[in-house]
Image (spheres, rainbow, N blue to C red):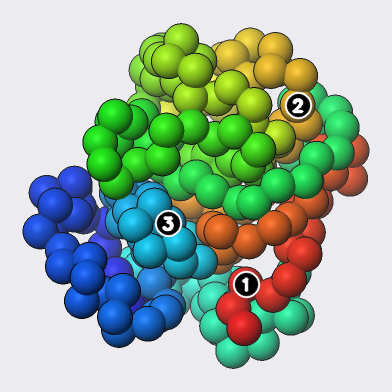
C-alpha cells in the first residue's frame, strides 16, 4: 500500500480499519509519511508489521526526484543495498546505541499518545523524528509534552530528519539540543528523511544501530525480506 499523500484524516481513518481482516491478509508493504505516522504506529501496535516511512505517490519526490526515487526503489527491491543511512549534519549528543526503529512526524506521535493505536512510549527504541510547519516554540512545546508524560523515558537513541517550514534551523537547533540533549542518549541530526527534497525511505520496526559520532543509522537486517 502506497499512500497518495500524508492525509490529516489518518487519525479518523485508523478507528475504521478491520484489524482482524488485515491480520488475516498477512504482511504487506505500507509506505507513507507525515500524517500517516498514525497508521505506521497502528500497524506496529496492532499487527507488529515493519513499515516504510517515505515518499507518497502524489508528492514531488515520488515522481520527479531521482535521489528519492532511487532510494525508494532500492528499499523495495534491493533492500540489502541500503542498510546504512548517513547524516549530513553533526551529532547533537554523542554516542552509539542499538534498538528497533520507530517514529515519524513529531506532532502525530504526540497527538496519538493515549489512544489505542499509538504505543505508550519509545523505551528501548531508536526514535526517528521530523515535522513540518511547526515554529520552534511549538516544537519545544511538543517535545516538552513528551518529556513530561514519560513517553521518551528509556529511549535508546534519536535520529532527526527534516524540519521544513519550522523556522530558521539556527533557531530550531538549540530547542532540539535543549529538549533532547539531556536524555543522555546519542542524537543525530539531518538524516535526510521527512518533508525535504530527495527524502530517504526509512523502515520502522527494524533492529538497527545509531552511531552519532559517524552520523550513521545502520540496519541489522534489510528493511524487507
- Image quadrant occupied by the C terminus: bottom right
- Local crowd size for mark 1, using a 10 Å CA cut-off: few (<14), some (14–19), many (≥20): many
Q: Picture coordinates of residue 110 (x, y %)?
A: 36, 29
Q: Are marks 2 and 1 in contact (CB under 8 Å)?
A: no
* Residues at marks 3 and 2, CA–CA distance in whole angstroms: 23 Å
* Residues at marks 2 and 1, CA–CA distance in whole angstroms: 24 Å
Which residue is under mark 3?
Answer: 44
Q: Is residue 82 above or below residue 173?
A: below
- Image quadrant occupied by the N terminus: bottom left
Residue 105 sits in quarter: top left
- Local crowd size for mark 2, using a 10 Å CA cut-off: few (<14), some (14–19), many (≥20): many
Which residue is under mark 1?
Answer: 223
Q: Is residue 112 above or below residue 87?
A: above
Per the image, label 2 sits on a secondary structure element best described as loop
Q: Which of marks 1 and 3 is in front?
A: 3
Q: Picture coordinates of residue 113 (x, y %)?
A: 33, 31
Mark 2 or 1 closer to N-term?
2
Amino acid at each position: 500500500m502506497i499512500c497518495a499523500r500524508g492525509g490529516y484524516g489518518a487519525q479518523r481513518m485508523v478507528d475504521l480499519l478491520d484489524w482482524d481482516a488485515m491480520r488475516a491478509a498477512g504482511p504487506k508493504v505500507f509506505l507513507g509519511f507525515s500524517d500517516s505516522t498514525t497508521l505506521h504506529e497502528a500497524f506496529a501496535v496492532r499487527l507488529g508489521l515493519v513499515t516504510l516511512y517515505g515518499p507518497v505517490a502524489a508528492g514531488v519526490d515520488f515522481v520527479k526526484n531521482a535521489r528519492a526515487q532511487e532510494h525508494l526503489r532500492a528499499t523495495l527491491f534491493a533492500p540489502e543495498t541500503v542498510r546504512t543511512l548517513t547524516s549530513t549534519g553533526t551529532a547533537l549528543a554523542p554516542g552509539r546505541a542499538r534498538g528497533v526503529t520507530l517514529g515519524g512526524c513529531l506532532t502525530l506521535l504526540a497527538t496519538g499518545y493515549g489512544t489505542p493505536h499509538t504505543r505508550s512510549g519509545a523505551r528501548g527504541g531508536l526514535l526517528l523524528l521530523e515535522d513540518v510547519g511547526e515554529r520552534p516554540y511549538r516544537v519545544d512545546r511538543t517535545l516538552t509534552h513528551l518529556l513530561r508524560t514519560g513517553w521518551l523515558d528509556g529511549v535508546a537513541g534519536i535520529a532527526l530528519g527534516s524540519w521544513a517550514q519550522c523556522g530558521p534551523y539556527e533557531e530550531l537547533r538549540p530547542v532540539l539540543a535543549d529538549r533532547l540533549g539531556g536524555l543522555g542518549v546519542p542524537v543525530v541530526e539531518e538524516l535526510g528523511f521527512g518533508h525535504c527534497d530527495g527524502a530517504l525511505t526509512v523502515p520502522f520496526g527494524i533492529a538497527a544501530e545509531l552511531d552519532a559520532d559517524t552520523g550513521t543509522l545502520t540496519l541489522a537486517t534489510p528493511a524487507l525480506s
